[in-house]
Amino acid sequence: MIVYLLLFAAVVLGQIQLSKQKSPWPGLGLPLLVFLAVCLGLWTTYAQRPGPPPDWTFLLGSLLLWNIPTYILLAIYWGSREKFRQEKELEEQRRKIREQEKNQE
């Protein structure tokens, strides 16, 4: 149990560090990997078993339920990127002020 908690903490800390990088793409890597792993797991579980395929609502529910770690990683990503969004908005305001000053001259 302790090993799983340490692994979870390492993944969360890694996600925070990746999300705080200037480029937005590294922070999306872990959520994408988790999403693909869940999709592959569901496909191997349900598509390769004998018998009729499961109901699509069951598959959709399974997909939504098993992607909870993806949602957590995306929430960490969006929370960590808040500083960059604020800086972008501030830069837009500065640009508008500079344009207004140029137009007044």
Image: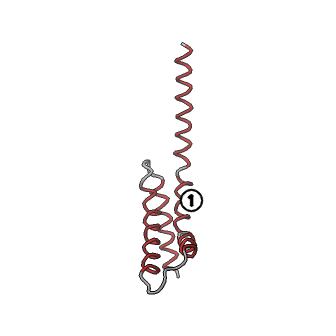
Furthest-bottom residue in this view: 50
Type of colouring: secondary structure
- Residue in the picture at 55% in, 54% down: 78
- Residue in the picture at 50% in, 71% down: 8
Where does label 1 land, which residue? 75
- Residue in the picture at 56% in, 69% down: 64
Q: Position of residue 81 (x, y in %)?
A: 52, 50
Q: Position of residue 1 (x, y in %)?
A: 53, 82
- Residue in the picture at 56% in, 38% down: 89
For the image, the number of numbered tags is: 1
Q: Is residue 97 above or below residue 62?
A: above
Nearer to the camera, 24 or 49: 49
Q: Is residue 85 above or below residue 48?
A: above
Furthest-top residue in this view: 105
- Which type of secondary structure does the marked residue at label 1 adopt? helix
Furthest-front residue in this view: 52
**Which of the 4 image quarters holds residue 94?**
top right
Nearer to the camera, 66 or 57: 57
Nearer to the camera, 3 or 87: 87
Residue type at the position of mark 1: Ala
Dot 1: few (<14), some (14–19), or many (≥20) neighbours within 10 Å? few
Q: Specify the quadrant that holds the C terminus.
A: top right
Q: Position of residue 58 (x, y in %)?
A: 57, 76
